[in-house]
Amino acid sequence: MMLLDLSRHTVRRNIAPYVGSFVALFLGVTLIALTVEMITAVAEATSRLEPGDTRTRLQLDDLASMFGVMSGFSGFIAIFVVASTFSFVVSSRRRELGLLRLVGATPRQVRRMILGESLIVAAVASLAGCVFAHLITPPTLWLAHERGLTPMKLDPPSFWPTLAIAFPLGAVVALIGARSAARRASRIPPVDAMREAAVERRRMGFWRLVVGLLCLGGSLTMLVTMGAVTGELSLVLGIFAPEMLVISAVCFGPWLFPALARLIAWPLVRRGDVTIRLARDNVAASAKRTASLAAPTLAISAIGGSLLLTLGIAADWDHAINQQYLNAPVVVQGGERTGTALATSPAVKVADASASTSITLIDREGERELEDAQTVDVASAVAARGLTAVRGSLGDLHGHTIAMSESYAFDSGYRLGSTMRVAFGHSKPVDLKVVTVVKSAPSLYGDLLLPPGLVAATPDRWFVIPQPGVADPVSTINASLRGTSGHAESADAWLAATDADLRKNNTFALWVLLGPSGFYAALAIANTLLMGSLQRHREFVATRLIGATERQVRKVVLWESALVTAAALAMGAIISATVAVLVGRSLGSGLDGMPIDIPWLGLGAIGATCLAIATVAAVAPTTFMLRRVHPSQAAE
Amino acid sequence: MTTLTDPEPGRTTTRTDAVVLDGVTKTYTSKAGKVDALRGITHTFGASTFTAVMGPSGSGKSTLLQCAAGLDRPTKGTVLVAGTDLAKLNEVELTTMRRSTMGFVFQSYNLLPALTVFDNVALPLRLAGVRPRRRDVLAALTDVGLDGHHGRRPAELSGGQQQRVSIARALIAQPQVVFADEPTGALDRTTSHQVLELLRRSVDEHGHTIAMVTHDPVAASYAHSVIFLEDGLLVGHLQHGTATQIAAMMSELER
Ligand SMILES: Nc1ncnc2c1ncn2[C@@H]1O[C@H](COP(=O)(O)OP(=O)(O)O)[C@@H](O)[C@H]1O
Ligand SMILES: [Mg+2]
């Protein structure tokens, strides 16, 4: 009781250090709450949908899961950001906390007090974030529709799901963030009340060590697995391994980042001026602060970098697969009459029709899920699209049977010989036997393949092998398609267009998934640096007193933030590169060749943005403070 | 619950030794090397005595105080406070011991800026889980001459007033011994005099025990006895010395 009372008092009077935590948490909760609102809006729209509107339903489902992933990323980044700010609160109040210990507070009491204060801040910030998110949901929904993200204009949802989900999530994020800060606060010895400058010892807490080692172990397992497996499992691991690596890097941060910064500074110090040397020593000596500053940058650069690389490699893989398996030199897209025209054209040897449809899968619990499927004619698909069985036999694909890609089989857990219950449109469900598992080639034939005759599907694309001896197949076929909506192009042109399309979708997905959390991370990095700089008022003044010019102090600060950011980016690059190499190797195995197109531009943009934000956010407050102080104040 | 105005006579005098140091050694080890801050100190701070610890800067005065108060653990030797061996206590037991038997006063007043004067003084009791009686806290403030200031914040007080608040806080739980490190280091002559008078009075009238580090002979002359430190060793002792005598001894030792 008493401690909460003290917490309330101290929060009220020590608002300044908590402003940073408040801002960080408020923004984080706003982001999470916003995604919850979007998901609710999507869910409400889905429940109002006509039962037959399967297309829109499928689109809305995808959208909901995308928002889910997005809020996951936001929450993840928020934990680090909020933890950093709480850690600053504790280090800026070192003396005060030491004093509390001195006049009789037990370590437990100090820990509870910090947790209490954090909870008060968290409650206010979370509530504010939820309300703010609810206010900005209508314009966000409008924008999402305007940008083509949602298939229809969604109505603003009710507020209660947001409050019920985002508010406690905010509190959880704050608690996780405050935990280690509070623990650290409780370890401040009472003598610190008497010390002017306390050098923090880098002793590692037990839990930090455990979590760090567990995550390191977990991520190493994932990395090893990624090296061993082939195919799309490595893509999934490639999405999760970076988060684990980030957590373990942050746990070992107080050793890792100063060491990295030292290494980066080494060539600079050898020929640089005194400010670089001073900056390096500051960064190395205040290990905890360095780690706190580096954490948000590391989180966003590692996750953004590896997602960018992984998605790029997935596109490279898709392209390589298509190139390897597509035998048909001509691709035709068109409508109903195109098929007839192709069948009668003398220039065509094989016209392999691809007809998409959506089917409803019904699992054992009766849960229904919509999936895309294609009907294929096995003989022509083998000839034109290089359809290859991995298990089972393609010859069995007739009657009540189904084929699936290797990666779908892996994801869904269906095996050769299992039975799938499927409904087509409104008709009665039927049981289909899985008779073959084929090589994955998502752009060529999707994940689920049905024999012809099972369901009526209209073809919209044909992979065409011309008769031998036809001189210019593309123009010849185009000529025979005159009068229909069909259009033929060379396989290379189609491959290029498909690739470009996929990459465009990837870019879009990246923006949706990482845009908000990236924006949040940017604000948070600025916020953290601001807190860090404001805390060092006395130190800056003292440095001025011993004869440093204002310019020199500014340069030291500039170098410090550059070194910290560079260390974080270096670690982020190492994580991204490791993940990318493993994903690339694992996807590329079994292919004749997979040229990798590294998205240097995007990666460079992440790094440059982090550096730019760090520089401005560190130097601006310093300049401001230096302008208002005079060296004589150091004597106070 | 006892208060400053209502002392229990004889409570602290039943034990004659408030703090006993026996062969206390303290060596700081850092990257730069080892520093022997204390090199075998044996001394007894008797109950109801006011002892000044003097010595040049870096002689180990603060270290001595910190070891005696259990804020730091000696490398070798034992420290007994009110008969308890501090080495046998863990961090939580030390804290509980500290809040019931020790008070602290420092050069920088070390008040919590967020709390009022009243709450600052009452804080040690609250941390100990005792509900402070308003009457007791106000009496403690009256005792240090701060009638009617209980509602203010530390920032609204002068340096001398803040130091008196921290003395009231140090004495509120009726500690066996008060440790003071340069309590007048940041004060002018007149306010120093008030603060030192206050400390002396609390020993003479209420039977408290005080160990005070200082480098000022005038401040040391308020104490019953003065011990001299140099280079981590006890090098001298003076009973009831005047400021002039103490200063003379200091300069003799420094020679
Ligand atoms: N935390 C510490 N780490 C290393 N050396 C220390 C530490 N505290 C004090 N010292 C050293 O111990 C010696 C005694 O210090 P101190 O007790 O503070 O002296 P005084 O209070 O008499 O000025 C000094 O040489 C000082 O440099
Ligand atoms: Mg000292």
Image (cartoon, coloured by chain):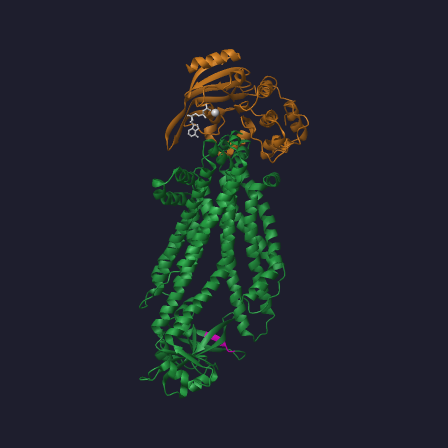
> Which lettered chain is shown in orange?
B
Magenta-drawn stretch contains A192: no
**How many labels were placed on the picture?**
0
- What kind of secondary structure does the magenta stretch mostly adopt? strand
Q: Between residue A426 and residue A329, name the one nearer to us.
A: A329
Residue B211 visible in the snapshot: yes
Residue A197 visible in the snapshot: no
Q: Between residue A491 and residue B195, name the one nearer to us.
A: A491
Q: Between residue A234 and residue B255, name the one nearer to us.
A: B255
A137 up-or-down from A124: above or below: below
A141 up-or-down from B10: above or below: below
Q: Position of residue A136 (x, y in %)?
A: 60, 58
Q: Is residue A217 left or right of residue A190?
A: left
Q: Position of residue A210 (x, y in %)?
A: 43, 47
**Residue B252 figure quarter:** top left
Q: Residue at x 55, y 16 (%)?
A: B222
A341 up-or-down from A16: above or below: below
On-image quarter of the N terminus of chain B: top right
Q: Residue at x 41, y 82 (%)?
A: A478
B17 up-or-down from A553: above or below: above
Q: Position of residue A278 (x, y in %)?
A: 41, 38
On-image quarter of the C terminus of chain B: top left
Q: Colour of chain A?
A: green
Q: Is residue A344 left or right of residue B6?
A: left
- Point out the stretch of residues depicted in magenta: A420-424
Q: Between residue A569 and residue A579, name the one nearer to us.
A: A569
Q: Position of residue A227 (x, y in %)?
A: 34, 60
**Residue A340 figure quarter:** bottom left
Magenta-drawn stretch contains A423: yes
